[in-house]
Image (cartoon, rainbow, N blue to C red):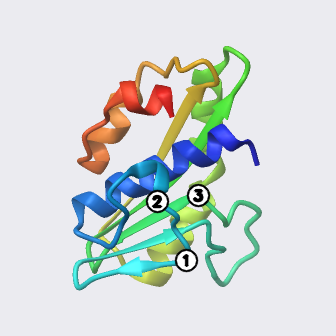
Amino acid sequence: MNIKNVYKKKFVHWKLCEKFHLDRSDKWYEHGPEGPVENENVKLLWDMNIQHDNIIEARRPDIVLVEKEEKCSIIDIAVQADVWRSKKEIEKLEKYQDLKREIGGIWQLRSIIVVPVVIHMLGSVTKKFEKWFEKLQVDANIDVVQKS
């Protein structure tokens, strides 16, 4: 896994921990997520294989946010060298559709969304970057994400 990719994932995880008052370090770059963290309202899974009944190839997203008994966000982050960021965003949306259906059936949640976060190695982001963070209701500080 690319080191830049790890830093971007840590930043997103850290922001989600901040939003939902989960344990985290003071600085995002010192944050070391390991396994699931949760409180009475949410469960945040980091790089975990999602167990389900059917055979699904894409079953290990970067981050899964489960807001207890309501909704789930499947978050997958990519840092890439080429300029086809929008194409990668679409690929990620399609990649997790089967997992989205499985989670809906097994966990009985009202809403499940797939959130693709695609960033160019040099820092540029897709046109929908801020929209995806709005769906998570997290402040997308693009400058920090680009510098990480």
Q: N-terminal of the two: label 3 or label 2?
A: 2
Residue 113 in sight in this render: no
Secondary structure found at label 2:
loop
Residue that mark 2 sits on: 31
Question: Where is residue 7 drawn, in percent x and y?
Answer: 56, 45
Dot 1 crowding, Cα within 10 Å, few <14, some 14–19, many 20+: few
Amino acid marked by disc 2: His
Secondary structure found at label 3:
loop
Q: Identify which residue is drawn at 69% across, 28% down.
A: 80
Whole-Å distance between the Cαs marked 1 and 3? 11 Å
Amino acid marked by disc 3: Asp
**13 w.r.t. 138: above or below:** below
Number of residue marks: 3
Residue that mark 3 sits on: 62
Residue 115 in sight in this render: yes
Eye-nearest disc, 2 or 1 = 2
Whole-Å distance between the Cαs marked 3 and 2? 15 Å
**17 or 114: nearer the eye?**
17
Question: Where is residue 29 drawn, in percent x and y?
Answer: 47, 49
**121 or 115: nearer the eye?**
121
Dividing the picture into quarters, in which one does residue 24 lie? Answer: bottom left
Eye-nearest disc, 1 or 3 = 1
Dividing the picture into quarters, in which one does residue 17 lie? Answer: bottom left
Q: Identify which residue is drawn at 49% across, 71% down.
A: 45
Dot 2 crowding, Cα within 10 Å, few <14, some 14–19, many 20+: some
**21 or 42: nearer the eye?**
21
Dot 3 crowding, Cα within 10 Å, few <14, some 14–19, many 20+: some
Q: N-terminal of the two: label 1 or label 3?
A: 1
